[in-house]
Image (cartoon, rainbow, N blue to C red):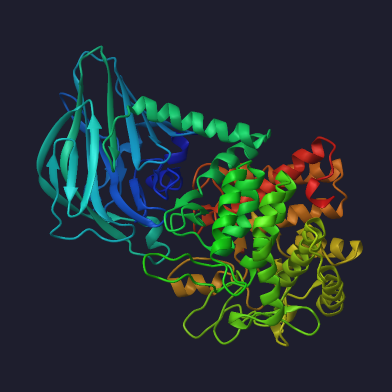
Amino acid sequence: MRFIYGKQNWNTRERGEENCYLLTNGLGGFSSGTITGSATRNDHALLMACVEPPNHRYNMIHRLEEELERADKCVHLSGQEYLNSAQSEEGYRYLSAFSFEDYPEWTYHLDGVEIIKRIAMKQGKNLVAVKYEIENRTSERVILKVTPHLQFVPKGEKTAPGQKFVLKEGRIVSGELTMFFKTNGQIRSFSPRLSEGLYYAYDACDGRRSEGSTWTNHQVIAEVPGKGKGVLEVLFGMEEIRESADQVIREAAAYREELVRASGMKQEAACMLVKSANQFVTERSTTGGKTLLAGYPFFEDWGRDTMIALGGCCIAAGQLEAAKSILKTFSAYCKDGLMPNLFPEGSKEPQYNTVDASLLYIHGVYLYFRKTEDIPFIKEVWPVMKEIIKWYRKGTAYGIRMDQDGLIEAGEGLDQVTWMDVRVGEILPTPRHGKPVEINAYWYNALRVMDIFGKMLGEEGDYGVLAEKVKAGFREKFWNEKKGCLKDVLSGTKADEQIRCNQIWAVSMPFTMLDQEQEKQVVDTVFEKLYTPLGLRTLERSDPEFHGKYGGEQIERDLAYHQGTVWVFPLGAYYLAYLKTRSYSREAAEKVEHQMEVLKSAMAEGCIGQLPEIYDGENPSFSRGCYAQAWSVGEILRVYEVLEEVKRGDVPKLYI
């Protein structure tokens, strides 16, 4: 799926900064910048290197300044906004086309000179390659000058005023960091210069640090004679560079094409999302296995996010060994029935403040098994799954325990243990202490999975009996007859009656508790009250606590985060639930496929080829939060997987 943009997409600086590309290396490192080449965030970088996967990241090269010099003038091809507008670069005026499929490509035209630029990143290495093809159809010599703007600071931090940079043969050194470079161009070195006042428009609107600075100490230069052609290659990495730019670009495209082949996906958008899904799969040095980053550019690998994203980003995408590695990694860190929400970094201990990750772990194991029938793996993780059920029954940390009615309750004090986990000082904007609806849907599903695996392994327990008790309690206490849907939580507060998207998982899971008519009512109520083509609202618009806009300082964002903000990932559960309640008919599949067409436009906005974290609740038109979110991509991929099964005339294997 090739995304193509033209001058109408950057007729102003602001429009040209709306969209960005993302390249990743499987280590947690990445390359990302806008279509016009500007850095509009602290976290934009040509090379964000990860020295210890996946979270020890350093912004090595923040951006490239590019100039084309002719006899009569020198103009910028790059774009960057500065606080002092006189410093701002306006290269977008010469940008004719931009495209992205497996790597970004820019085409510039300037009075008889054409420059095509490509960037690619190598898998498994902190290595980025930039290639310029220059065709000079004038009679005059032209000079392309590329100036790397350096930071050499931990991701998100500012450069230091007295920071020193030493340019040696083939490398740049600053403090304990060394970056290697390789080029066929000429190197022109100069004393380090500090560039201050870079303006980050997309951090400013969210109340983050809105300005930054960089250092420069050299240019890379290519001269092209009149009526001539030339190629300039520049590669930057954290170890000795042996590759050529062409090699890195070819390997990047081949790697992504192999991902599509392994997935078996056929639809164009699904194939693109398979490639995008892989950008979240990274190594984790502290565990020696794979993990999933929750989102770019902000988030790390979190337990809950990983377990939600796993089914799509790995299993539906055909990356089964990665899924197995992730499940093994989590099983090693299970403690008192809880999966880590944050992994240990250095001397830090794992954090376990999540009620859903463990139950979703069992769900993930089931998804993996239905795709692979890997019984030896089930035997390997069976003791861990039994521990989860045991501790949830007897009670574990954060007030997580089974009540006498068989339902799970969780949360105490200021704990926030569901995905609606915002805390603002002493305020819980979405308090869900008690018995959350989706947690009990996950609990029932886990018990049914345990019943199946127990019988298969000859270790039958009372999982099936307990599941029936949970079903009876759930139907009795969660069903809201007046509203034709489910209560969000059982807490004895007004939160119980709020219409939220969490109820959709009580229909979309493989094993569910409601009768067919109730499930259909839930789906229809969610469609009426919460559905948008880009995601589900977290709260219906008529609720007094509804916040229609997400943005501003962190406290403003947090107060809106789950109070109506549209999230993409629950949309996957909605479509799965809709297909299920329509018996996976071809008519239903065609309806869903038609409704999902708009997601192609979502993939062309923000981070190209990706799906974002959230949108405004009132008018979801422009992406907010993380511009690339793992569970958004993963859950939509699961829908595409089911659609392709229905097209083949199959009942989705998961629900047999």
x then y, percent, for residue 40: 36, 52
Residue at 23% over, 29% down: 183
Nearest the eye: 252 or 106 = 252
Direction from residue 89 to residue 204 in the image, left or right? right
Residue at the outermost front position = 458
Q: Is residue 522 above or below residue 51?
A: below
Residue at 80% over, 45% down: 652
- Residue 7 figure quarter: top left
x then y, percent, for residue 539: 67, 70
x then y, percent, for residue 362: 69, 61
Nearest the eye: 87 or 262 = 262
Q: Is residue 99 above or below residue 327?
A: above
Give the mark count.
Answer: 0
Residue at 50% over, 52% down: 289
The quarter of the rendered structure image containing the N terminus is top right
The answer to whether residue 588 of the structure is visible from this angle is yes
Direction from residue 341 to residue 435 in the image, left or right? right
- Residue 502 figure quarter: bottom right
Direction from residue 208 to residue 191 in the image, left or right? left
x then y, percent, for residue 641: 71, 43
Direction from residue 380 to residue 114 in the image, left or right? left
The answer to whether residue 595 of the structure is visible from this angle is no
